[in-house]
Image: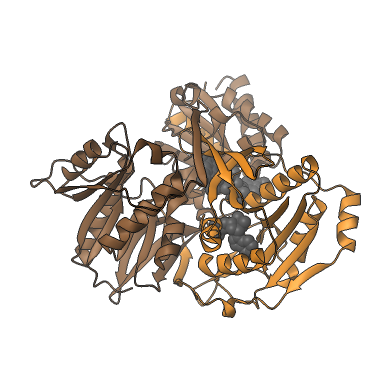
Amino acid sequence: MKILVCIKQVPEHTSAVAVHASGDRVEIPESTKYRINRFDEFAVEAAAQIKESVSGTIVDVVTVGPKSAETVIRRAMGMGADHGMIVDDGFTDNLTPDVISEILARVARRSDYDLVFTGIMSEDEMNAQTGQMLAAGLDIPSAVGVVEISRIGSDGDIQVIRERENGVRERLSISTPAVLTIQGGINRPRYPALSAILRANAKNIDIISDITPAMTDKGNDRSVLRIAPSAKIRRGKILEGSVLQKAEKLITILKERNVLI
Amino acid sequence: MNSRLKKIIVIAEYSDDRPAQVTLELITCAREIRKIANADIQAVVMGVRPESAAQILSLTGTDVVSIEIDVEKEQYPLFQRRILESAMEELKPDIIIAAHTSMGMDFLPGLAVSMGASCITGVKKITVESGQFVFVRSVWNGKFDAMIRSEKAVTAVSVPPGSFKPADGRAAKKGTVSLWKNSDIAEDRRIRIESVEKKGASSDSSLDDADVIVSAGRGIGKEENLEVLREFAGLLRKSAVAGSRPLIDCGWLPYRRQVGVTGKTVSPKIYIACGVSGSSQHIAGMAGSETIIAVNTDPGAAIFNISDFCVIEDVVPFMEALVKLISTSESQGC
Ligand SMILES: Cc1cc2nc3c(=O)[nH]c(=O)nc-3n(C[C@H](O)[C@H](O)[C@H](O)COP(=O)(O)OP(=O)(O)OC[C@H]3O[C@@H](n4cnc5c(N)ncnc54)[C@H](O)[C@@H]3O)c2cc1C
Ligand SMILES: Nc1ncnc2c1ncn2[C@@H]1O[C@H](COP(=O)(O)O)[C@@H](O)[C@H]1O
């Protein structure tokens, strides 16, 4: 079985991320550390677990991003992925899901993947659509919000559970090749062991430069006019002072509402 | 895409023969667009027995296309998408509006690809600037809003539940209902729904009954830190500890304590969010709380936008100080 996991890097912390002076994008400080988008970490773990249970499984990871995304690719390799690939995005800002999914489709077509995993959503862009567009581009089925991979059949069918609203879950049979977009909670992503990290560090990462955003015939299907801090809906009174003073003010609020025992 | 358009299509969801609440909200969204651009609105209700839901939906004054599919096809989501695709070819919408729900997330991006349409998800507001539509969506876990313009002739948008007021079902003039049947679509059985099960979140009422909910997010750092929140909750009348989804995913709290779009919707007297960023999926579950208090180190965290009171502090030391202060003032008898 061959699995491709699509991962994206996101800033470790977002408190220093601000609106850029241009007003049409965010500014991420130079010193920012990156981690794997949380939902993609679940996807890498899901692939690593299949590799452990189905012999002969090979797991590739890919990201469309800067070369410095090597760090998150190595982390995924430390978790169990065999090969890492970076499609150098040439520092193009604001790639939209239609372009990213087209690039990922081109990567996927280079090998015979049985399964392609994405996260259900990126924490920065929050589109929740790249995996589905990738599936449509490859003309293969996709299951959205997978919380369990219950069976991997030798007949090329897999069984998964997908989450709907209100605690409702759907059990699906899907014929491979297929895309699964992975929801949080499907597993507990492992911390790579030191030996696994050392092994991963010794491996090569393929930098793919013959698939570029400019090559996709699609072009961004939308553009960002502006980015702004999100609007205030409530008054948001800031409690000022020392820790103790803030705690006292909060106690007054609780007392006014008569909830202290 | 400019604001001179002709047709807006709303894709309905229904259950128990009634249109979903979010579908009525989508009708309002479509009407707000119509205020700006005089277009026709049509809703599409598709399913095994769509007609009752279609009739009820038409009471809002909306024209409805009711597409009946055989029971046999209901199990095949891709099959249904093909039917929807062929319906769109006939209806020729300029804007398609679906709900940003598990259903909308499932079919809309693929539908947009097959139609060559732009797909903009999680749209909570639509405005017009210089004759062009601007779609507003949350990004960065709710920290920022992005104002987006479509670059295609057709635009598919998904709208999160709760973004618009539901349309009134007592319009002066009922809309028309056209009954369609779809039989001549190429079969696609590559995905099959085997069964549907319920994980049961609603059986536990401890969150429903609570006057105060102390809610933990990833900002608490580690599982042991839940203890100080429990201690604090213990000092409050009718209180309960809840959490954001990542904490439930880690197994730190049981699923029935998850607040949000895939967990519980709560509206206590006081909701205290501790180290929660305030993503739209979390806010969907607690925005109706009477008083919202948030503790977060990031002054720009989205949770502060819906808070009545904001505490910019490292959550664990702050909660420790709070617990200590309450306990000592108690022992002094004041
Ligand atoms: C389909 C779907 C359904 C979902 N359903 C839900 C749902 O039902 N409920 C839900 O909650 N989420 C849900 N999510 C996940 C959601 O998108 C967010 O990922 C999640 O809500 C983030 O949780 P968080 O705020 O705890 O963590 P984060 O977003 O990581 O935020 C942590 C916050 O803690 C702050 N912080 C860090 N350190 C400290 C400190 N020392 N002291 C104080 N503050 C600190 C940070 O500034 C940050 O604001 C869903 C996602 C999808 C795609
Ligand atoms: N630049 C990227 N490189 C690789 N995978 C990506 C990229 N952007 C998004 N994805 C994948 O698509 C998923 C959904 O992203 P989105 O549609 O932006 O919410 C993510 O969880 C990733 O798995």
Residue A253 against residue B114 in the figure, above or below: above
Q: Position of residue B32 (x, y in %)?
A: 24, 58
Output the letter for the chain in orange: A
Q: Is residue B108 left or right of residue B239?
A: left
Give residue A99's position: percent from left, percent from top. 54, 70
Q: Does A9 appear above or below B290?
A: below
| Horizontal side of residue A57 vs B263, given as left or right | right
> Chain B shown in which color?
brown
Task: Let me know if residue B94 appears in the view.
Answer: yes
Asked whether B78 or A33 is in front, the reply is B78
* Snapshot quadrant of residue B174: top left
Looking at this view, is A23 or B46 the one in front? B46
Q: What is the quadrant of residue A125 in the picture? A: bottom right
Q: Nearer the viewer, residue B44 or B31?
A: B44
- So how many labels did they put on this image? 0
Whether A147 is drawn above or below A142: the answer is above
**One can see residue B294 in this view:** no
| Quadrant in which the C terminus of chain B appears | top right
Q: Residue placed at 49% from the left, 38% from the top? A: B193
Residue at the image point whose x is 50% and y is 28% from the top: B197
